Image (cartoon, coloured by chain):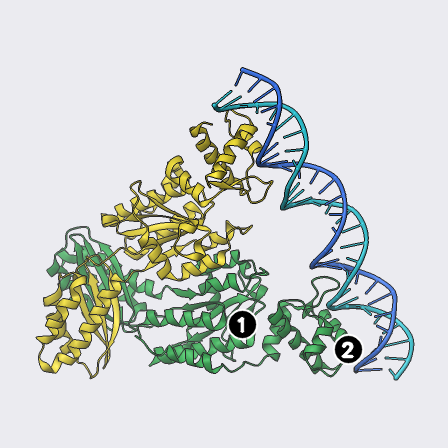
Chain colours: A yellow, B green, C cyan, D blue
Amino acid sequence: MSEPRKLEVLRAIVEDYVHSREPVGSKALVERHHLGVSSATIRNDMALLEEEGLIAAPHTSAGRIPTDKGYRLFVDRISEVKPLSAAERRAIHSLLEGPDDVEDILERTVRLLSQLTNQVAVVQYPHLSRARVRHIEFVLLAPRQVLVVLIADSGKVEQGVVHAATDAADEELMALRARFLGSIAGSQLDLMPQVLPSVVALCPPALRNLAGALAHGLERLAERSRDERMVMAGTANLARSNVDFPLSIGPVLEALEEQVVMLRLLSDMAEDPRGVTVSIGRENPYDGLSEASVVATGYGPGSSAKIGILGPTRMDYPNTMAAVRAVARYLSRILGG
Amino acid sequence: MSEPRKLEVLRAIVEDYVHSREPVGSKALVERHHLGVSSATIRNDMALLEEEGLIAAPHTSAGRIPTDKGYRLFVDRISEVKPLSAAERRAIHSLLEGPDDVEDILERTVRLLSQLTNQVAVVQYPHLSRARVRHIEFVLLAPRQVLVVLIADSGKVEQGVVHAATDAADEELMALRARFLGSIAGSQLDLMPQVLPSVVALCPPALRNLAGALAHGLERLAERSRDERMVMAGTANLARSNVDFPLSIGPVLEALEEQVVMLRLLSDMAEDPRGVTVSIGRENPYDGLSEASVVATGYGPGSSAKIGILGPTRMDYPNTMAAVRAVARYLSRILGG
DNA sequence: TGTTAGCACTTGGGCATGTTGAGTGCTAAT
DNA sequence: ATTAGCACTCAACATGCCCAAGTGCTAACA
């Protein structure tokens, strides 16, 4: 038995199964792919593949389908990342146009990726922990309500409402703003908890109370911008691509709604040297995703934030990986510029 | 045949069907509800109800299920909005706590509503067209990139990036900010297109270019905040409550992703004097929702923004309506205060 | 030694057939 | 107007049968 042919057979099985969604048998295999051997030979190979746990038969006399392990081998050793089609390239390019507001861009990106792959696309907001304070603003909404706005040099704006114990005057706020800004402008968001208390301590006693509340608000904002968020699109694809429901979409929708779950999932995916990381079926730490795969990669400075897609284990890995990688690259380029 | 009993029968059918998800027959009906008559009598009544198009039989010898028209009559004339349970009341109350950032509140509200009803919950951002400018901020991100921030007195913050044709200096921006703010502070967002050009015209020629770009940016922000947005939660409920899939969730997910569709749907729902508006099955203008119902109501000042839920036509209307109404009231109270 | 043809064997899916039970509509009696 | 009774309908379920697809094995072959 030749080792290379065995892999070729696995590849053929994966490709056919992804395409047809039906267990694939030895005969159909030799017909569609011009391997130079007979079905009997293929059967021998298949028996070996099954022994190794790479494929499995749903019942005695049906064709074989790839196991998670089979997909893994396929992704790692067999598949070549296909180049994108011209149309896809064009679609990504047109993303370059339009306003370059971070939120807008991410929203359009994730929509694009979901269309490109026909899967659910997810993108994590860029990490901002290394961002610095560019500007702050205190706005009096009501006598005891102050809107606190924090602008980072990354262009991200965070806002929140702070309640004061006593009435605050506009002039006081102006003064405090100057004070705070003088001390924290240019500092990393990370360092806010260290820097802010000293500012409060230096305030005149009359303002100390208000200053404390504002400092607390700023801290919360700084933390929130570190606190991760995500955007997603294409959930309808879940229903579409699973008309025959091998993937029960309930648990998947649940996972998607629990953004925390998705964010951890993305964060935990190690960076693959080939550029795109794949997590297949039961490899996923979350139970609801045991029939799903995640294809993700980093983007932006240091590839710290992640972008990726979620779909059934039975997916077209080569194309999906190519799409994810391409979109991530473009995204990095846009945000970096 | 007595008219009141006929309605009673319809009510019983609706209630049983909503509960059991199975066509309900005459015999089961007399058993479960103590109507003082025999199944034969019920059968006669049912025949009449069917003639009027209020109920239908899936096949010759099965029980009856309510039609859209039947649900409509049920909602309009029969059902009483049930009071909420103590637990539900408590859940809503605990919503009162926590930061009262608009976004936060809406997010928690929509989550709560989806849990309360076991449906998909949707909430529209409050209309801001009548809001006024409280504050603006120009922040230099790069020599030719300016972050424009617009803060409305409603507490909403909008931001966007503006590209300048030439390099801009910090002092110039400060000067322009003072100029703009002086003219537009307190004006309605609506009026920005009228007010802004005159400000630009009054600028010294050297700054006119930059001022024009900034004015354009501000206009965009003002428009965007009028431009409606929504939050939703509970999509997983779609899969859960439809294990046997009488409601194919694909089209529904599509509708939910097309936020424009949902927003129009909500906006178009007339305000019902009883407080909650219901749109049932094919009454919905959107095709994908022909097997779904929307229960919605207004909240906030003038009840201008909408909050509601989306679920299968076969839903527990009384409880759902009660939940939507109660949550909307609490939300109004929180935002109003 | 690897490949192949041939064959017996397994099994899910499709189909025709039979049975059951819930449910209806009608009629005649109350 | 209501009801009991009855004949009728039909989906759901079960049973049995056959078929096609697919397997594993063995013996022959290059």
Residue A218 locus on image (x, y percent): 20, 69
Regarding residue B200, the answer to whether it shows in the image is: yes
Please give the residue where the numbered disc 2 appears in the rendered image. Answer: B41
- Find numbered disc 2 in the image and state the secondary structure of the residue it sits on: helix
Residue A333 locus on image (x, y percent): 26, 45
Q: Which of the two discs, 1 and 2, labels the residue nearer the N terminus?
A: 2
Q: Amino acid at mark 2?
A: Thr
Q: Residue at x 52, y 66 (%)?
A: B311
Asked if residue A157 lies left or right of residue C15, the reply is left
Asked if residue B224 lies left or right of residue A60, the reply is left
Q: Residue at x 32, y 60 (%)?
A: A229
Regarding residue B177, the answer to whether it shows in the image is: no
Q: Is residue A221 above or below residue B331?
A: above
Residue B302 locus on image (x, y percent): 41, 77
Q: Residue at x 45, y 59 (%)?
A: A253
How far apart, in angstroms, are the residues tagged by discs 1 and 2? 32 Å
Q: Is residue A203 above or below residue B313?
A: below
Q: Amino acid at mark 1?
A: Val
Please give the residue where the numbered disc 1 appears in the rendered image. Answer: B278
- A46 or A172, which is in the foreground? A46
CB within 8 Å, label 1 to label 2: no
Residue B254 locus on image (x, y percent): 48, 56
